[in-house]
Image (spheres, rainbow, N blue to C red):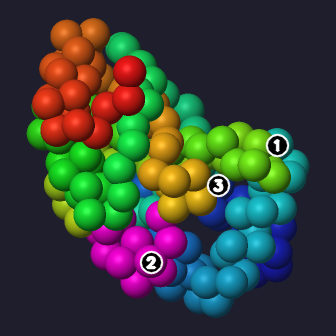
Amino acid sequence: MNAAERRDEIEKILSASESTISATKLAEKLKVSRQIIVGDIALMRAEGMEIKSTPRGYILTHKTDVFPYMGTIACKHYSDNMLDELYTIVDFGGTCIDVKIDHSIYGEITAQLDISSRYDADVFMSKINKADQPLSSLSDGIHEHRIGCRDKEIFDLIRKELRKKNILIE
């Protein structure tokens, strides 16, 4: 299979999937290296395909925009409170869509998270612990999260609980 055929196959696989697929799994299916898949995804994005990269893999962007309510919270904490923050969000039924910081040189930096369960949070924290470089470390712990929920009431419950834990900035 040539590169164009492989990218068509990646598109078919992502279109058929309702959840994320890692570069490693795509590489196994297509019998190429993970790095080839990463390059293919970059080329597909450059051609206009909206592919979201999350800590757990790739997914087409339109498949993740399914939240009846989305809100943004501002937080301040360090690595020791990160798991508690994420568990609070998902335990109330929210999805932590992304994290955003304001950087003194680069301006606004946003990273996709798509954390919607304790399992997702644990996988994410495992990666953070290996790298020891959360994005919020570049902004003295200050960051924002977009949170997707089924309604505003859930969002307000998440805010209330994060406020009690002294994580929320108001």
Asked if labels 1 and 3 touch by Cβ distance under 8 angstroms, the answer is no
First of labels 3, 1 by sequence position = 3
Looking at the picture, does residue 60 appear above or below residue 57? above
Q: Label 2: which residue?
A: 132
Q: Which residue is at 39% across, 37% downward?
A: 75
For residue 30, side relative to residue 20 (left or right): right
Dominant secondary-structure state across the stretch colored magenta: helix
Which amino acid type is marked by label 2?
Asp
Q: Residues within 10 Å of mark 1 (few under 14, many from 20)?
A: few
The residue most toward the right is 47
Residue 60 numbered tag: none
The reply to whether the magenta stretch includes residue 96 is no
Q: Which residue is at 39% across, 43% downward?
A: 76
Q: Label 3: which residue?
A: 11
Q: Please state the extent of the stretch shown in magenta in the rendering.
A: 123-134
Q: Residues within 10 Å of mark 3 (few under 14, many from 20)?
A: some
Residue 48 numbered tag: 1
Question: Foreground mark, 3 or 2?
Answer: 2
Confirm whether residue 107 shows in the render: yes
Residue 15 is situated, as x and y percent measured from the top left of the image, at: 54, 47
For residue 69, side relative to residue 57 (left or right): left
The residue most toward the top is 152
The reply to whether the magenta stretch includes residue 125 is yes
